[in-house]
Image (spheres, rainbow, N blue to C red):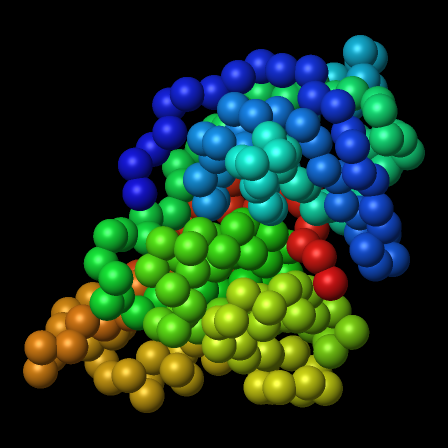
Amino acid sequence: MDVVTKRVIASCEIIEQTQVAPHVFRSVLVEPTVAREARPGQFVNVRVCDCYDPLLRRPFSVHAVNPERGTFSLLYDVVGRGTTLLMAMHQGDRVSIVGPLGRPFDAGNDPEARHILVAGGCGAAPIHFLSDWICRQHGCEKVTVLVGAKTGEGILCEREFVAHGVSVEVATEDGSFGFRGLVTDLLEARLSEVGPEARGGQSSGGRRPPDIMQGSPSPPAPNTQHPTPACTPAAPCR
């Protein structure tokens, strides 16, 4: 996927502000250039007020886009002053954004490629966008999403991934739902089923190993792509 160089500094109107889970909010903003140009794995830097606290912009992964409406979405966990101020804003309020920024995922152009998308914690936000992108480009049949959380209650975006039509597997650290362990442990288990060629990026028997792309607050697994920034304050939907 080519790196997008076209970006804007813009004042964006908030047209939807929704609490989707405890401490988790979704903001839908109007900005046609971001909606049209953003690619999965990119982010926007947001300034929520003309003030000195917070002084710096905050990065948020682009969670979803709607080019027809000229809108894009952010999902975030309220963890500090910046996200607290954003949470308190209402429909019709405006924020300043810079973007899209960062290096996107490279999903390739091969319609026969298999994709394993690893969504650990808040990394589910860009993975949601990526899953939708691949499905629109090549269909969902060859996409598997691995979703991880500490507990079953913390599983994020599973229903949206299922709605995309992709295969979804879940890992929880306490074993309360799905695979017991880290989502990267689940990835290792699935790669062992594919074969050792998947770990080294080599093919055997004419079968190409799957492309592995990860969005996670933890260090990326070997041979995976992950966006920049690796994890932002943005939190995914439930």
The answer, for residue 163, to whether it is visible in the render is yes
Residue 171: x and y, percent? Answer: 59, 79
Toward the front, the furthest residue is: 68
The answer, for residue 224, to whether it is visible in the render is no
| Position of residue 83 in the picture relative to residue 74 (left or right) | right
The number of numbered badges drawn on the structure is: 0
Q: In terms of image quadrants, where is residue 66?
A: top right
| 156 versus 168 height, above or below | above
| Position of residue 114 in the picture relative to residue 89 (left or right) | left
| Position of residue 189 in the picture relative to residue 82 (left or right) | left
Decide which of 84, 95 is in the foreground and name it: 95
Q: In which quarter of the image is the C terminus?
A: bottom right
Residue 234: x and y, percent? Answer: 67, 44
Residue for point 49% across, 56% down: 132
| Position of residue 195 in the picture relative to residue 178 (left or right) | left
Residue for point 22% across, 58% down: 110
Decide which of 126, 92 is in the foreground and name it: 92
| 217 versus 35 height, above or below | below
Residue for point 53% across, 76% down: 168
Residue 93: x and y, percent? Answer: 84, 23
Q: In terms of image quadrants, where is residue 237?
A: bottom right
Decide which of 128, 228 is in the foreground and name it: 128
| 71 versus 137 height, above or below | above
Residue 84: x and y, percent? Answer: 86, 36
Q: In which quarter of the image is the N terminus?
A: top left
Decide which of 81, 67 is in the foreground and name it: 67
Residue for point 52% across, 51% down: 129
